Amino acid sequence: MSKLEDTATIIDDMVTQLGACISRPEYSNPAIVGIHTGGVWVAEQLHRQLGIIEPPGSLDISFYRDDFTRIGMNPVVKPSELPFSIDDRHIILVDDVLYTGRTIRAALNELFDYGRPASIMLATLIDRGGRELPIQANVVGRHVELEPDEQIKLSGPDPLTLEIQKTA
């Protein structure tokens, strides 16, 4: 197991990138939504630092996953919370680790069940490559290359720490 760079530094870099994006006049009144669990932790920190007024939303995509039947009928499901209308809103969707793209696909499906946003910008703490779907983040904290038997684990919420772990 090895630790990665300080998570606060990575989030600061994401704030700089997102700040540049959302400062454009056409990107007014954005809302931020995190994907359970790590994405919610990252979204809360980004929300505070960006000074977004409305509270952050959260998505639990358990029922939207394409591997739902493989993981069984007993997933731990938390309710999604979107304390705002997403219709015609600019949404910043946040996840901790972007890998195959399947989690993001599920999150997009769920978001569209709530309405039709003006746009969705994807921000991820770590992009580890290995895409199975054509999904690309707009804002990436860090790109990390891993061995096939490694994965990244975000622990938190306070403090947020990243570790590389062996899978088997």
Image (cartoon, helix red, strand yellow):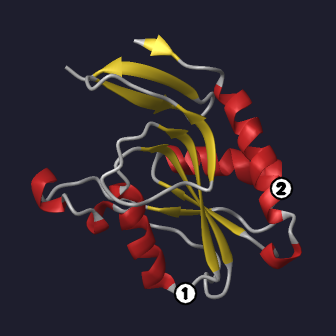
* In-front residue for pair 57/107: 107
Residue ID for mark 2: 20
Identified by mark 2, the residue type is Ala
Q: With respect to residue 37, does 111 lie above or below?
A: below
Q: Taking 23 as reference, is 76 left or right?
A: left
In the rendered image, the quadrant that contains the C terminus is top left
Residue 156's quadrant in the figure? top right
Q: CA distance from mark 2 to mark 1?
A: 24 Å
Query: Which residue position holds label 1?
Result: 116
Nearer to the camera, 133 or 47: 133
Three-letter amino acid code at the position of disc 1: Arg
Question: Quarter of the image holding residue 53?
Answer: bottom right
Please state which of the two labelled residues, at mark 2 or mark 1, is closer to the viewer.
2
Give percent across and percent down for residue 101: 38, 55
Query: Residue 136 at what x, y percent from top left?
Result: 50, 56
User: Dot 1: what SS?
Assistant: loop
For image coordinates 61% across by 87% down, the residue present is 87
> On the rendered image, what quadrant is the N terminus found in?
top left
The circle drawn on residue 36 is none
Residue at image coords 75%, 38%: 13
- Drawn side of residue 8 relative to residue 82, left or right: right
User: In percent of the image, x 48 and y 32: which residue is there?
Assistant: 154
Q: Position of residue 164 (x, y in %)?
A: 42, 21
Are the two marked residues, 2 and 1, in contact with CB atoms closer than 8 angstroms?
Answer: no
